[in-house]
Image: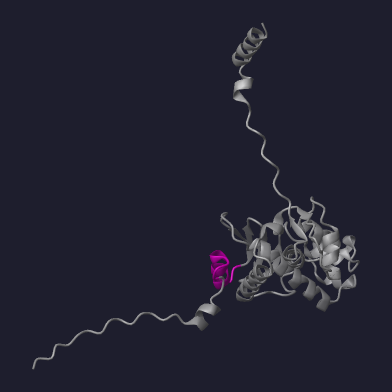
Amino acid sequence: MTVVGTTPPPRLPVRDRATAHQRVGVGVSPMLTRLAEERATGVLDREHGTLHLAEGRVVHAESPLAPGLAELLTAHGTLAAEAWRDAEDSADEGRLARYGVRPGALELAQVGALFDAAYFALAPSSTPGRFRYGAAHWLASVHPVPVAALEREMLRRRALLRRIWPDPATDGAPLVRADPVAAPAVPTRQAAVLERVDGVRRAVDIARELGRPAFHTLVHIRRLAAAGLVAPQPPPAPDPPPDVVAADPYVALLKRVRDALEAL
């Protein structure tokens, strides 16, 4: 009897979930991944904000869609606006301590503002980012955040908002109050947000007025949307198309002649 040997099929590659989870920047920003691996220092400009890096870690973030660290520190009297400007102009974080901001309080405020602005800066975008190499931000030593940790937090926040209310339309549009038949009672912090819904203010406007992080305000607004209490302002109705026939002077003249003949 002749035995015919067969070559076993090649084994398919098995993805190591533990290794995949540790890779930085997956699904958030490939450029940020490369910068982290490179241990780059500078500023990453994106469509909705900027990230400041020092040796591959994110040390500061800014976005027009979120109150900045200065706004959060000065909103409730923690720090005078003049004191912040003095520290910023001198690029000396130590001056903040001289004005009464304790290092622990500064660290909490800095990391909170960083995650808040980074949520918007790292939002999906069709506009490519641009990195500018340069000196580290003056707050770089307060609380550097590894890119892997930033990625996990951004994904967690996106998932949280989807669970609360899957429609993101309330995040950036002017908000209007809905009028449910039986309006449920809302917690105090949500009530403060609801009071400022007027058909003009957006989530970021309400966050700035309250001196709160923008993401926390998004959470409240999505809960209010899920309860049927707020909705995005509907877009204005489009203008009716011009009446081409009526706009033609010759057609208008013929119509007047017709009307005159019918009147005889």
Residue 118 left/right relative to 86: left
Find residue 216 and report its horizontal and vertical position in percent. Answer: 76, 68
- The colour scheme used to paint the residues is one colour
In which quadrant of the rendered image does the C terminus lie?
A: top right
Q: Is residue 121 above or below residue 199?
A: below
Residue 119, by quadrant, is bottom right
Write the residue at 65% across / 33% down: 240
Q: Is residue 115 visible?
A: yes
Residue 46 percent across, percent down from the top left: 62, 58
Residue at point 51%, 78% (across, down):
20
Q: Visible in this render: residue 87?
A: no
Q: Is residue 34 magenta?
A: yes
Q: Quadrant of residue 162?
A: bottom right
- Please indicate whether residue 19 sits to the left or right of residue 168 in the image: left
Query: Residues in magenta?
Result: 26-40
- The quarter of the image holding the N terminus is bottom left
For this rendering, which residue is in front, 162 or 206? 162
How many numbered badges does the structure rendering display?
A: 0
Is residue 48 shown in magenta? Answer: no
Q: Which residue is nearer to you in this view: 201 or 147?
A: 201
Image: 122 above or below 101: above
Q: Is residue 57 left or right of residue 195?
A: left
Q: Residue furthest top?
A: 264
